[in-house]
Image: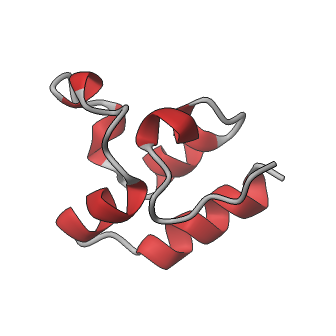
């Protein structure tokens, strides 16, 4: 499986077995935002984490560890 990095889109992450769970646990608002539904194909996890001041490295680490 390709490693998740800061350029991975939210839509790709949501396709992973534990993707949504990890995003929710870290408080990524795009998962439940109706407006984001139109943009998740383009939103990258790094951009979202920076925008909302979320722990980008920890989110990416958890995504990779829990979806191996």
User: From the viewer's perspective, is 11 left or right of 43?
Assistant: right
Q: Nearer the viewer, residue 32 or 38?
A: 38
15 on left or right of 36? right
Give x and y (percent) for residue 59: 52, 65
| Residue 67 against residue 65 in the figure, above or below | above
Is residue 64 at least partly visible in the picture? yes
Is 42 located above or below residue 4 in the figure?
above
Name the residue rendered at 75%, 54% in the picture.
66
Tell whether 27 sits left or right of 52.
right
Residue 16, image quadrant = top right
Residue shown at 67%/40% (left/top)? 18
How is the protein colored in the picture?
secondary structure
Label count reads 0
Quarter of the view holding residue 3? bottom right
Residue at 36% over, 53% down: 27
For image coordinates 56% across by 66% down, the residue present is 60
Q: Position of residue 63 (x, y in %)?
A: 64, 57
């Amino acid at each position: 499986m390709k490693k998740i990095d800061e350029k991975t889109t939210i839509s790709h992450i949501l396709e992973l077995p534990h993707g949504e769970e990890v995003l929710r646990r870290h408080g990524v608002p795009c998962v439940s935002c109706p407006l984001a539904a139109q943009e998740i194909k383009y939103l990258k996890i790094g951009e979202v984490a920076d925008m909302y001041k979320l722990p980008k490295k920890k989110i990416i680490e958890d995504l990779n560890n829990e979806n191996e």
